Amino acid sequence: MSSNLADLVILSIVARKNVAYTDIISVVKDIASEYWSPTGDVLCEAVEDLISKSFLEIQHSALNGERLQITKTGLEEFSSLLLRLRDRDTEIRYSRLLELVQLRSLDLVPATVARIIIEQMLQRANSLIEKLEQREQVPGPEGRFIGAWLSAEKQDLNNRANILSEIARTNLLSNEICLEDGRPFQ
């Protein structure tokens, strides 16, 4: 699981912007630090594996040094990972990181892939809301403050679901609006 997550995070970063080969590990750690603490060895191995599979390549430049660039097959793998790696397949502690990577990557994948990702995220949020509502119906000896905590969790999930619905409704995923650096699929 963590190798797929490492691949997804690395590809999402390089898909958005070419990154110095020597900086990729610190960039991943900066983005993922709140949710995940991979070792440098794990990330280095993932980068080397992505290069060996031709998903990433190293560009040499006298001006910019060695920079990582995503390849066409890397973009395809990136889209595939976004669809394959779902919240239910991740450990709870990684689900927020996956959500973050999915949201920051929506404009880098074809609109059809982005719509599927949004639908999956909405289904997950709605499923979690239903579970919380069911849990609220079952009285239990959970302490007097658990109700407030569950209410806050439910409000957070409702907010996330509303944001995802708004993204889908207003078609913020159109290429005209979201093109960035000429990288997303047409």
Image (cartoon, helix red, strand yellow):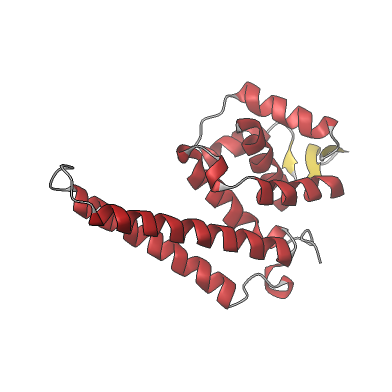
Q: Quadrant of residue 109?
A: bottom right
Please, is residue 61 above or below residue 80 in the view? above
Q: Is residue 17 visible?
A: no
Please, is residue 118 above or below residue 91 in the view? below
In the image, residue 64 lies at what x, y percent?
Answer: 79, 41
Report whether 126 appears left or right of 103.
Answer: left
Given the current orientation, which residue lies at the most extreme left position?
Answer: 144
Residue visible at 84% across and 34% down? 53
Residue visible at 52% across and 62% down? 122
Which quadrant of the figure contains the N terminus?
Answer: top right
In the image, residue 77 lies at what x, y percent?
Answer: 77, 45
Given the current orientation, which residue lies at the most extreme top position?
Answer: 41
Given the current orientation, which residue lies at the most extreme front position?
Answer: 138
Which quadrant of the figure contains the C terminus?
Answer: bottom right
Given the current orientation, which residue lies at the most extreme bottom position?
Answer: 170
Please, is residue 170 above or below residue 64 in the view? below
In the image, residue 26 lies at what x, y percent?
Answer: 60, 33
Relative depth, front residue between 172 and 150: 150
In the image, residue 157 lies at what x, y percent?
Answer: 40, 59
Report whether 97 appears left or right of 78.
Answer: left
Q: Is residue 160 visible?
A: yes
Residue visible at 29% across and 52% down? 135
Report whether 185 appears left or right of 154.
Answer: right
Report the number of discs: 0
